[in-house]
Image: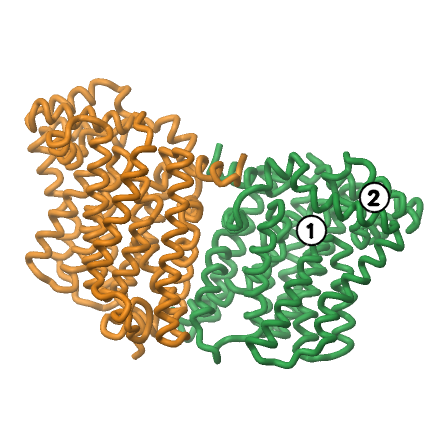
Chain colours: A orange, B green
Amino acid sequence: MKMAYSKNNISSSGDRKIPVKRIILDERYVLLFVLVVTVTLLSFSFRHASFRGSPDEHYYLIYATYIDGHGIGSFPALSKEYLENTKLWSYPTPLRIGYILLSAFWLKISGPSLISLAYLSLICYCFFLMAAFYFIRKYFTGKFAALFIILLAFSPLDMAMTTRALTENAYCLFLTLSLWLFLDYVKENSYLKRVLFILACSFTILIRENGVLLCLFFTLFLIFLKFIRKKQVRIKDFLCSSLFPIAVVFASYAVFLGIDNAIKLITNIFLYSQPKTYAIFYGSGPWYRYLIDYLILSPATTILGIGFIVHYLCRYREERREEIDYLILFFIFLLSALSFYHKNVRYAINLSVPFRIFSVLILGKISQKLSEKRAVLFLAGAVIAIAIWDFTNFSYLFVNLGMNDPVTFILLKARHIIN
Amino acid sequence: MDRKYLFFLVLAAAITVLSFGFKFNTHYILPDEDYYLNYATYINKYGIEGFSYLFQQYSQDRAYSAYPNPFRIGYILFSASWLRIFGYSFLSLAYFSFFCYCLFLIVSFYFIRKYFSEDFALLAVILLAFSPLAMAMARRAISESAYCLLSTLSLWLFLDYVREDSNPKRIAFFFTYSFTILIKETAVLLCPFFFLFLVFRKFIQKKQIKIKDFLYSAIFPLATVFALYVILGGIDNTIRIIGIIINSPKTSIYAITYGGGPWYRYLIDYLVLSPATTILGTGFIFHYLCLHKKERREEVDYFILFFIYILLVFNLFTKNVRYVINLDMPLRIFSLFVLTQISRQISKNNYRLLLAGLVIAIALGDLINFNYLFLTHEINDPVSFALLKAKHIIY
């Protein structure tokens, strides 16, 4: 069977190996280079970032400062205050223990300020790039990972979030870790990977409670493996993918917040949390609203990504590969699941990774018809051109126009699609 | 059942559905509709000599510059004849659009059946018949449906004559294309496309192209149309009107307010109008680029080039998804290719049934969208602002 995307015979792209090595000595240098370049560029943009701070950013700062000042034992008091003041219910909940602890620890080192919290986002972004690079290199090839990381590093949305004091980058880092560790443990059936996955997944939910949706996705993927791909899936896999991480999260809630507070906070999310007027005005629309947002943020990767999904579905029987099935299912799941909530492209920040993997894959497939030398030039040229385009988009939207929250209305207005 | 009967069934269904939509038609009249009715009424009263006055009036009165120009001789003549038979009203002019929409479906069925297969044509026509944009334009008294019909006919006839190298086809194309420009002057932008396709055929596909092909595809239709403008309106007025058309995007407040944005604005509009076909259609282009040479087809190359060309060229002007209504057909043909492939992947034995089911589901989705956007929300001009607002993407 032709395995166009198989690890052994694919380079960054398609069926045959492309001697990228002649041009790129070691892909790890590419990662290092990309990290240095993006961090340098981002630190310039920090000068332009206006740290007025959204209400959410202020709340994160208050929570972190409070925990930093009063210690871990003060989580119950924080929860009580939140539960007693109904005005706070529209803002981030203290259930985000993971992020609050992480930011409290960070503020202890760097001092309590919004810019300091934004630097935490930048650090998470760097780790996110490293984690994504590690796993992509493992599941595809080093050359593929090098091209992919160039695209990912210049993703306008990810770059923009590094200049904010929000949870997005931390959430993105841990969700990416959970996503790949789950695949690792399903494929390798290793005890260590299973434990690492449970910890990563639990921490993702502790960073942001909507990470719990991941458990549903993992369960669905196991069902897909069992019934569509006819693979052996055990009961304990189902337990590890959903019940264990949720149990760890509940245990953490009980320990840090107290059982009563935890139950009240969870009930509060489902029953009483009122959507903000802001969310009603800027967060509605159909499922494809995320595609519109991504199209404005990064037109090339969005169109190429959609192109790859369509191509893969048309050639599924001949060219299927489990990692790609997994990423496509994740993509579709996230688009569907997030369409039930208030919409903001920030919440779908994790689509950046599949979009960029798919983009490199489709560019690779297109380049297959060229000679080896031309294919390398085409791929490298296309990836660098897209990265530059994405960077100019970031620069225009988030630095020049000073956009804080990338809601569709503001994105459309910035691009003069509406006036 | 014979596919031709099924086709007429689809046509009947589309007509029935649309005729329900007509009762909502008279709430709001676009200024363009008013102008078309006035032009047609005037020509009916004063005959073809009346064009001289229309040209003069348009070229001298600045107030007219934001509205349809009298270069649209073809549409004005067509609508004048139609109004003479069916009476002078907006509704009557809207029925003319409706008539063009039905002819567009028949033409599409004929050519798609010729180039692909009867089954494929039938399914393509189901998708085309329920296109929200085509349906919406079929109930307005504006030139879009007539333009869509004639530009589609020109596109297919060009392919016909280039492939078959037949003189009658060449002449048929020449007349049709010239008339398309007379329906809406933006059709002139198809000239460079035809020219580029001939260059593509000669240098990429290494096929024989004669000098007369280049002449028929670009020079002759343009020369004929220009000569007609000069005969009917005079050289001075013609040149002045060309200047007004070129400058109108900069001067029209409506165009400035609602017609800006980048090239992918059309994709956003199409996504709102018909998400499934837009995603499948756009994705197909990349799938096709991945195919080996022997899997490719000239007709598909042609429509992919057309799709990319239109997106790029119409990026230079005021943007309104109405102006790129002829992207609907390639998008829907591409979608059908993808759906066929996916159905075959899922079930080799029952793929026809699955494919029919998927096509009907998409057509229903499109019909619901049409109903929501154009009947419930009464959108008259499908500018991005109105489409996004109706879908609550903006408030």
Where does label 1 land, which residue?
B144
User: In the depicted view, which residue is nearer to us: A191 or B168?
Assistant: B168
Left-right relation of B273 to B241: left
Q: Which mark is residue B39?
A: 2
Residue A219 visible, this orientation: no
- The subunit letter for the residue under badge 2 reads B
Looking at the image, which residue is at 84% across and 52% down?
A: B77
Q: Are marks 2 and 1 on the same chain?
A: yes
Looking at the image, which residue is at 12% across and 49% down?
A: A198
Residue B375 in the image, given as x and y percentages of width and height: 61, 41
Looking at the image, which residue is at 52% across and 39% down?
A: A416
Residue A398 in the image, given as x and y percentages of width and height: 38, 38
Q: Which mark is residue B125?
A: none
Q: Are marks 2 and 1 in contact (CB under 8 Å)?
A: no
Amino acid, disc 1: Glu
Q: Element under label 1?
A: helix
Residue A390 in the image, given as x and y percentages of width and height: 38, 49
Left-right relation of B221 to B231: left
The quadrant of the image that shows the N terminus of chain A is bottom left
Residue A104 visible, this orientation: yes
Q: Residues within 10 Å of mark 1 (few under 14, many from 20)?
A: many
The quadrant of the image that shows the C terminus of chain A is top right
Residue A415 in the image, given as x and y percentages of width and height: 49, 41
Q: Element under label 2?
A: helix
- The subunit letter for the residue under badge 1 reads B
Q: Does residue A26 lie above or below A75 as drawn?
A: below
User: In the depicted view, which residue is nearer to us: A130 or A258?
Assistant: A130
Q: Does residue B149 lie above or below A45 as drawn?
A: below
Q: Earlier in the sequence, mark 2 or mark 1?
A: 2
